[in-house]
Each structure stands twice: as C-alpha cells, then as structure tokens.
Amino acid sequence: MKALDLDVLAMIVAVADTGNISRAAEVVHRSQSAVSMQIKTLETALGKPLFVRGPRNVTPTQDGEVLLSFARRMLALRDEAWAAVVRPDITGRVVIGVPDDYASSLLPSILKKFSATYPRVEIQVVGLPSVALAPMVKDGTVDLACATRVKGLSGEFIRFEPMVWAASPSAHEIWRERPLPIAVFLPGSVARENAIRSLERAGISYRTSYESPSLMGLLSMVEAGLAVAPLARCAVPAHLSLLGHAQGLPGIDALEVILARSSKSRRPPCDFLAEKIMSELRPG
C-alpha cells in the first residue's frame, strides 16, 4: 500500500480549488514545477490520472474527485489533532476586514485552516473597500484588515499583488475598442487609480462603462463581454483571459497588500490569525 503524503494531498486540494497549477503553487509555497512533479509522481503511483489538463485550467477526474474528498478530510483531521494537543484553550472572537477581491481569493483557505486549528475562536469577516476599512481599524471596529495600503491605513507589508486586465475569452477583441470600455471599482480604489493612470500614460482613451464596489459586479460585466476590468491577479477566475502588452494594453502598477491591526487586537486569537495570514501570504 502506497503512503499518501499530506503535503502532496495539500497540493492536490490547492490545484482543485484554484483550477490552476501556477496559483496552487503560490498557495502551498512551492514552485510550479515541484507541484507538477509531485502530482505526476502520485498519478504514476496510483496508475490513474487525477486531473484533466486544459489550455487554461485543470479539473479533477472522477478518480481525482474521490481522492479529493479523502484529502480534505485527512488534512482537516490533521489540523484538528494539532489544535487539540497544542492550543486547546484558545478562545475569543476576531473581526477581520478585507476588500472584495481579496476576500474571494486570498482568505478563504487561510480562514478554513485557522478555524480547523482554533475551533473555539469565532471569526467575523467585514467585506469593504480598503479605504472604508481605514477608519474601522483606527477605532477598533475591526481587529485586523488584510487590505491594500491606502491613505490612512498602514500596517505590516505582506506582498505586492500584480494587476492585470481581465476579459471574457468569448468577447470579440473588446480590448481593441476606443474608447476602451472598462469596469472599475468606485473612486478611492487604488486598483482603479492605478489602471486609469496606466491608460493615461499610454495615451489610450477609455470610458467607464461600469462602476461598482463589488468584485462580482465587475466580473458580471466582463463575462458579458461588455468591458475589460483591471483586477488583482489573484482575484481573476480561471475562465477569464488575462490581457497585457500583447493586446496593446499597458502594464498596471502592483497593489501593496498589508496587514493592519487595531490597538484592540493585542490578544492571542488576533495574534495567531495575524501570524497565519503572514505565513500563508508572504512569498516563500
């Protein structure tokens, strides 16, 4: 009977959740080649493919889905066992603020792991733009904020998140239109400001076809083929196309992701969640 390495199972889960080996490698802090090699080695040992590899994403096979269900249970059990022995007495409540684009991509796996390790800690997530979270950190309404650095919001540097132009693969070269139709977050958004500044520097005319505080709102316009959207790369679903210089669009300045803490957050549950966020999101 072959051994099932939990680290390799974590890679399998990351690939299934992201639909992309490159993004999965970022989640597990390994190189893309290392993740690919480990998966292929396991597939060889099992004698069955676990994923169907397409041009844009990968999807689990039927056997892959079977292994995934066991992998998730095994990884959760490992985390529960660790928590039961190491820190069984940590209780409390943590309120964390996060913008829409990071909430959908960066935090779900972290919060899931944290909850498994500290099951007695209650987590409340407040989804708001970074600029709206700044006063909430200052007055202690939120304990932590994983957000973009904006005026009035300072914290510990996590990483620079690249920005890209996202479009529907079925849209008929919408990026060639002038003025360029763009879907952007509301004024005050750093992502919006960076994108508009890049277009103006490149001398590309544009029109704001849609404004929204919601990532889902922007994605709906992109998926309908009515606009392109400047987004954090981590927030772009695998089924959308990433555009850049090859399509005549300018590069966009990266977003500075930080972890901000309120003065009321100096307590163990907040410390441990902050530690988890930093260790998971900082480049390896």
Image: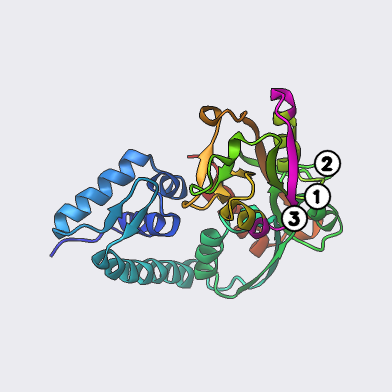
Residue 202 forms part of the magenta stretch: yes
Q: Residue furthest bottom?
A: 120
Marks 2 and 1, how far apart at CA: 7 Å
Q: Amino acid at mark 3?
A: Ser
Q: Position of residue 176 (x, y in %)?
A: 60, 34
Locate residue 118 relative to residue 54 in the image: left or right.
right
The tag earlier along the polypeptide, 2 or 1, is 1
Tag 3 residue:
212
Q: Amino acid at mark 2?
A: Lys
Q: Which label was assigned to residue 131?
A: 1
- Residue 279: in sight, yes or no? no
The tag earlier along the polypeptide, 3 or 2, is 2
Please report contact status of discs 2 and 1: CB closer than 8 Å, yes or no. yes
The tag earlier along the polypeptide, 3 or 1, is 1
What secondary structure is marked by label 3?
loop
* Above or below for 273 versus 154: below
For the N terminus, the quadrant is bottom left
Looking at the rendering, which quadrant does residue 16 occupy? bottom left
- The range drawn in magenta is 200-217
Q: Position of residue 132 (x, y in %)?
A: 81, 54
What secondary structure is marked by label 2?
loop
Q: Residue furthest top?
A: 202
Closest to the observer: 268 or 234?
234
Q: Position of residue 69 (x, y in %)?
A: 34, 71
* Above or below for 207 versus 269: above
Please report contact status of discs 3 and 1: CB closer than 8 Å, yes or no. no
Closest to the observer: 239 or 257?
239
Q: Which label was assigned to residue 151?
A: 2
| Camera-side mark, 3 or 2 | 3
State the residue at coordinates (54%, 31%): 247
Looking at the rendering, which quadrant does residue 196 occupy? top right
